[in-house]
Amino acid sequence: MKILKIFEKGFQTTNKKLRMVVYLWLINFIFSVLIVTPFYFLIKKDLPRSLMSDQILKGTGLLWLSDIIYKYQDLLPTLVGWFLIPALLFMLLYIFLYGGIIGRIAAQDKKTDLTSFLSDCSKYFLPFLRVFLISLVAYLVVFGGIHSLICALFNLWEKSASTEWPLILVSILEFLILALLFSIVRMFFDYVRVRLVVEKSKKAIRATLLNMSFIGKRFFRAWLLYLLVGLITAVFGVIYLAVYQPLPKIGVLLIVGFIWQQIYVLSRMWTKILFYSTEYHFFSFHKEKV
């Protein structure tokens, strides 16, 4: 089956699961409100009627973080916790949700209601948590080892540069390599999750080892499919920024900006499902041939 044919099947499956996009958006929205609300009241209480407060609440300033850390430097451990704990909860939330996404995709024509979606989330949470812990080791090896080695080689080139252009080129290349390495590792463990669901298994280490052979034999085809969906995600991001950045953050336009943000979030939820739909069909097709 050609890559575009698999992409088409994944696209069709994703559009059959649009109800799941709504579930993901709703859960993401509720989670975001629970996380953001304490910060909102802190800002309104201690920085009322100030320019910095307006910038924070409108999302137009980035230097506010250093100001808040300076103001509350005695509470720095608490502030760090406020950022790390939400980040940890966010990761756990998506580990939980991935089970529902892949489970409902694998169910094919079966009904996708909230009960079945949450049931799959719960069913695969622990196996997917183990996959996540294994992936941390992979990220450490790739970014702590391979990427560091590449950067060291680039540094030798930078030292011999006589103009600023090589430095700019090196920065661009380092970013591209980082993004490509990240995509490879993420794709690999996506297929580990897909394998666990398709085989109805909970053995994360076994699935990881088997996936090395599966991806190794079909790496470029699998990666090309992944990058194709990634390109769609990037296009959505560019369109979002092109509209949102010049939009005035005042009056009624604040509401317009908020609505546009939520439309973008919906598009991100849709592409998450598209990633797993295409990977599911790729895995299913090649597994039958093994």
Image (tube, grey):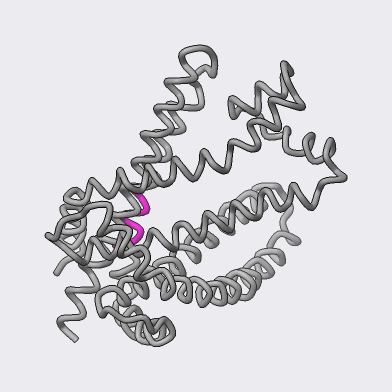
Q: Main secondary structure of the magenta part?
A: helix
State whether residue 77 is above or below residue 258.
Answer: below
Q: Residue at x 36, y 81 (%)?
A: 202
Question: As drawn, which residue projects farthest toward the right?
Answer: 74
Q: In which quadrant will I find the C terminus?
A: bottom left
172 left or right of 229 in image: right
Q: Find out whether residue 271 is within the magenta segment.
A: no
Residue nearest the observer in this picture, 194 or 77 = 77
232 left or right of 30 in image: left
Across and down, in percent, residue 286 comes to 20, 77
Across and down, in percent, residue 164 comes to 70, 47
Q: Residue at x 29, y 73 (%)?
A: 197
Q: Residue at x 45, y 20 (%)?
A: 255
The image quarter in which residue 84 lies: bottom right
Residue nearest the observer in this picture, 147 or 94 = 94
State whether residue 9 is above or below residue 142.
Answer: above
Across and down, in percent, residue 241 comes to 46, 33
Across and down, in percent, residue 59 comes to 59, 29
Q: Find out whether residue 229 is within the magenta segment.
A: yes
Q: Which residues are magenta?
A: 225-231
164 left or right of 7 in image: right
